[in-house]
Amino acid sequence: MKKRVLVYYSGRVQGVGLRFHCRMLAVKAGINGWVGNLRDGRVALVAEAEETLLHSFLKKMADDFSGLITGAECTWSDSVENLTGFSIK
């Protein structure tokens, strides 16, 4: 089943290549959505795909940035399928 996940990453997540790496992984996996810096120092991620694919994607992000991400607030919902491609905002 397709799902949507909204993630707020905190820690040392801006200026370390997280957005570029996130986009690379998402495009490779066929995940739609976007990632962007927030003014409060966090990074926001919105992604839509099959739920199992999203879990694998989020695990890979957590593993690849384990020394920099100190928190990840996730909110899951049904996919609205209005996203195409994956962009950096």
Image (cartoon, rainbow, N blue to C red):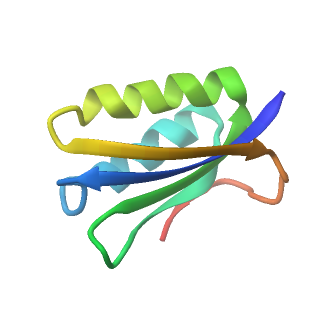
- Left or right: 35 with respect to 49? left
Where in the figure is residue 44, as x and y percent of width and height? 46, 60
- Left or right: 57 with respect to 75? left
Q: Nearer the viewer, residue 87 or 56?
A: 56
Where in the figure is residue 22, as x and y percent of width and height? 42, 45
- Left or right: 10 with respect to 23? left
- Left or right: 41 with respect to 83? left
Q: Determine which quarter of the picture holds residue 28.
A: top right
Q: Quadrant of the N terminus?
A: top right
Where in the figure is residue 50, as x and y percent of width and height? 74, 29
Q: Is residue 87 above or below residue 17?
A: below
Q: Nearer the viewer, residue 70 or 60?
A: 70
Residue depicted at 48% across the width and 71% down the height? 89
Q: Nearer the viewer, residue 88 or 56?
A: 56
Q: Is residue 6 above or below residue 31?
A: below
Residue depicted at 31% across the width and 44% down the height? 71
Residue depicted at 65% across the width and 36% down the height? 30
Residue depicted at 70% across the width and 27% down the height? 51
Residue lying furthest bottom: 39
